């Protein structure tokens, strides 16, 4: 759900004339309204989740995540009130960055060309300059992924990097986290953590981190890596794949916000 300027909505609905041609420019959001899916039985539980959000902001905002202003509301369901955590989040223009998709130079250029108002952006970068733009993307990605690693080491939490649309690549080459709805604790114990829907979100987020490092930074997995190596053990990954398959089967063909691997 988006917050829009009234004048922009009127232009989208009624159109404007430019060079004797009527066109209907889509209204750009000012803010996005997020509703956290978790339902809280106690105020203390909601505050705990809010603290997780603020912790992620501490490591990633404002460069690597969309800033958000959170608030709690009472929501009446079947005569009972539930506490919902909501947030007004800055709108980030760009294209979805899929850790499992191709991210070579041609693929990065294709992402750039699909971005909203790409005609405007192409005045700032031409095809011959893609090498420089892709280099900027990789440099900024390196800084963003470094901060995520720092969060894992120091705070033992990781945001959901695996969900479809959770990461956005902007026209300026920045990578931003836009979904902070499923922050999971990073545990190096043997058990594989699954969220309330049954998705092994922690392991898949670490895998997404590793894939981004490999594809954007050319970094192969270090077996001594204290952050990723334990999660990317071949035996553990097979177990994660089984859990992931069960999750997708339970959600049906169109009920998941995670890619099918």
Image (spheres, rainbow, N blue to C red):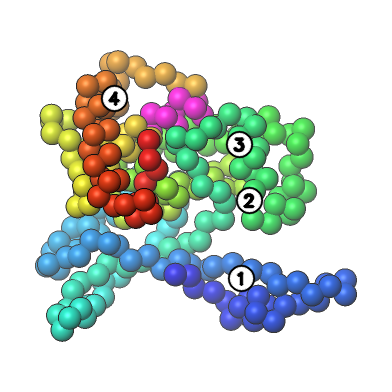
Identify residue for label 3: 108
Relative placement, left or right, of 123 versus 82 is right
Tag 2–tag 3 contact (CB < 8 Å): no
Which of marks 1 and 2 precedes in the sequence?
1
Point out the tag, 4 or 3, that comes first from the N-terminus.
3
SS assignment at label 4: loop
- Earlier sequence position, callout 4 versus callout 2: 2
Label 2 to label 1, Cα distance in Å? Answer: 15 Å
**Residue at numbered disc 1:** 27
Label 2–label 1 contact, CB within 8 A: no
Q: Nearer the viewer, residue 257 or 65?
A: 257
Residue 152 shows in the view: no
Sequence-first disc among 4 and 1? 1
| Rendering coords of residue 76 (x, y %) | 21, 80
Residue range in magenta is 209-217
Report the Cα–Cα distance between label 4 and label 1: 43 Å
Where is residue 126 drawn, in percent x and y?
76, 40
Vertical placement of 224 versus 208: above or below? above
The residue furthest right is 20
Name the element at disc 1: loop
Q: Mark 4 and mark 3: span between their CA atoms?
A: 26 Å
């Amino acid at each position: 759900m988006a917050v829009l300027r009234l004048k922009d909505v009127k232009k989208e609905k009624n159109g404007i004339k430019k060079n004797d041609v009527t066109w209907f420019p889509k209204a750009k959001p000012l803010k996005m309204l997020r509703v956290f899916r978790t339902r809280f039985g106690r105020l203390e539980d909601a505050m705990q989740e809010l603290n997780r959000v603020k912790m992620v902001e501490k490591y990633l905002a404002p460069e690597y995540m969309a800033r958000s202003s959170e608030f709690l509301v009472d929501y009446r369901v079947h005569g009972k009130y539930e506490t919902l955590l909501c947030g007004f989040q800055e709108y980030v223009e760009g294209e979805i960055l899929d850790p499992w998709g191709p991210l070579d130079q041609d693929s990065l250029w294709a992402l750039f060309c699909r971005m909203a108002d790409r005609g405007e952006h192409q005045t700032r970068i031409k095809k011959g300059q893609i090498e420089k733009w892709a280099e900027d993307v990789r440099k900024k990605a390196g800084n963003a992924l470094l901060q995520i690693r720092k969060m894992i080491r120091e705070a033992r939490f990781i945001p959901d990097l695996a969900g479809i649309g959770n990461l956005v690549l902007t026209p300026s080459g920045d990578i931003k986290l836009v979904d902070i709805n499923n922050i999971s604790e990073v545990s190096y114990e043997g058990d594989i953590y699954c969220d309330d829907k049954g998705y092994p979100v922690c392991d898949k987020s670490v895998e997404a981190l590793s894939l981004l490092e490999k594809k954007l930074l050319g970094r192969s997995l270090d077996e001594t890596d204290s952050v990723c190596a334990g999660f990317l053990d071949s035996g553990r990954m097979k177990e994660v794949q089984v859990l992931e398959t069960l999750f997708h089967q339970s959600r049906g063909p169109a009920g998941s916000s995670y890619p099918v691997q």
